[in-house]
């Protein structure tokens, strides 16, 4: 989505905390998404490598560093979309003492940026987050009520040998939407179709 938006003239910033910039670009280009095709509308910030290179940054809290760089880049590269890869890594690296409170603060700060932010994360494996088993968890610390939208990606078994990438819009505040899973197909870009049986 970020690459497609960049091709259409909307600027995007992808912030990676774990995967190096070169590795990330290599993987995306392997899928056919070339950074050079975006005419400078897509920027990749490798915060992990950057932090290693900066003197004194070891003492700088990760969350502060993330905020400092994303705000600083915004002054010269007015991005409309921000992707954080990943929320799970930020939580560990920033040593969130009170995850729900710190998540609330982070999401409020992101809203103040006045851009669309995508926070990538892993869904809890037990699907309840340790809570009521009748209510599936959509976020690690039940912070799903804070955000305007939630998208799920999964790999689903198709037949005996096949697998299919699928996308589900769990929540999209202010819009009517189908909440079922749909096939995510990659062929000269990506598209969403009805799931294949």
Image (spheres, rainbow, N blue to C red):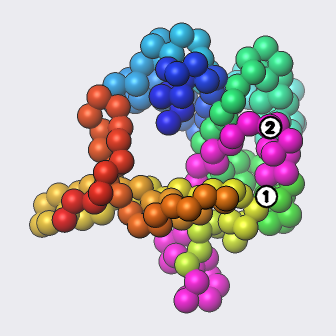
* Image position of 33 with respect to 58: above or below: above
Q: Is residue 197 left or right of residue 20?
A: left
- In the image, which residues are magenta? 106-135
| Nearest-to-viewer mark from 1 and 2 | 2
Residue 114 bears which disc, if any? Answer: 2
- Residue 74 placed where, x, y %? 79, 23
Name the foreground residue: 180 vs 74. Answer: 180
Residue at point 24%, 64% (across, down): 157
The reply to whether discs 1 and 2 touch (Cβ–Cβ < 8 Å) is: no
Q: CA distance from mark 1 to mark 2?
A: 17 Å
Residue at point 86%, 63% (across, down): 101
Which residue has dot 1 on it?
A: 103
Mark 1 Cα shell of 10 Å, populated few (<14), some (14-19), many (≥20): some
Q: Specify whether residue 106 is in view.
A: no
Q: Is residue 26 left or right of residue 59?
A: left
Which sits earlier in the primary sequence, circle 1 or circle 2?
1
Magenta span main SS: loop
Give the quarter of the image for residue 163.
bottom left
* Image position of 132 with respect to 140: above or below: below
Q: Secondary structure at mark 2?
A: loop
């Amino acid at each position: 989505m970020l690459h497609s938006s960049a091709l259409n003239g909307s600027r995007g910033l992808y912030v990676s905390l774990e995967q190096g910039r070169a590795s990330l670009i290599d993987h995306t280009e392997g899928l056919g998404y070339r950074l050079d095709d975006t005419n400078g509308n897509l920027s990749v910030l490798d915060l992990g490598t950057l932090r290693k290179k900066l003197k004194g940054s070891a003492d700088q809290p990760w969350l502060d560093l993330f905020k400092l760089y994303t705000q600083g880049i915004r002054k010269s590269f007015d991005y409309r979309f921000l992707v954080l890869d990943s929320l799970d890594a930020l939580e560990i690296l920033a040593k969130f003492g009170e995850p729900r409170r710190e998540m609330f603060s982070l999401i409020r700060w992101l809203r103040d940026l006045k851009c669309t932010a995508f926070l990538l994360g892993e869904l809890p494996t037990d699907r309840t987050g340790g809570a009521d088993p009748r209510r599936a968890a959509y976020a690690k610390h039940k912070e799903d009520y804070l955000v305007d939208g939630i998208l799920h990606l999964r790999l689903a078994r198709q037949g005996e040998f096949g697998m299919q990438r699928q996308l589900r819009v769990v929540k999209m505040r202010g819009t009517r939407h189908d909440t079922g899973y749909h096939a995510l197909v990659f062929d000269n870009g990506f598209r969403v179709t009805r799931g294949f049986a």
